[in-house]
Amino acid sequence: MCPFVQLMEAQTFYEHEVSFSVGIFQLRTDYGINNDAETNFGNQGVEVSLNYYYNTAARRSASYFQQHFKYRLNLSYSTVNLEHFGPDADAPLA
């Protein structure tokens, strides 16, 4: 065996996955009139999310838990300007 040659593996035993997403979401609460389209569509915001998955099932001798579960780290930021829409919001205070 040559002393200058090292045994290297092309793959490791673990898998790492990273995803990034940006999207629009609706904040639906009981703040306003129930099933009112103006309230639901008026309270829309933006969300940015970063997800990281760690999978240990790449090994051939992985246990049942390692084959069927992943570890997940989710970092998300959401912002919305919550307003009250509808006839009660438009009516003057008495």
Image: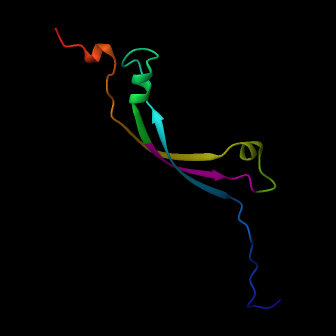
Residues 35 and 77: in front is 35
Vertical arrangement, residue 46 with respect to residue 19, above or below: above
Residues 26 and 75: in front is 26
Residue drawn at x 44%, y 14% as measured from the top left? 34
Residue drawn at x 24%, y 13% as measured from the top left? 91
Find residue 60 and report its horizontal and vertical position in percent: 81, 56
Residue drawn at x 76%, y 87% as measured from the top left? 5
3 relative to 23 in the view: left or right: right
Vertical arrangement, residue 69 with respect to residue 31, above or below: below
71 relative to 78 in the view: left or right: right
Q: Which image quadrant for residue 94?
A: top left
Q: Which image quadrant for residue 90?
A: top left
Question: Please, which residue is most extreme toward the left here?
Answer: 94
Tell me the quadrant of the picture where the N terminus can be found.
bottom right
Tell me which colouring the rendered structure shows: rainbow
Q: Main secondary structure of the magenta part?
A: strand
Residues 72 and 60: in front is 72
**Badge count:** 0
Inspect the magenta stretch and tell me whether residue 51 lies in it.
Answer: yes
Find residue 61 and report its horizontal and vertical position in percent: 81, 53
Inspect the magenta stretch and tell me whether residue 55 lies in it.
Answer: yes
Find residue 14 and report its horizontal and vertical position in percent: 68, 58
Residues 83 and 14: in front is 83
Residue drawn at x 73%, y 91% as measured from the top left? 4
Q: Which residues are magenta?
A: 47-58
Vertical arrangement, residue 8 with respect to residue 71, above or below: below
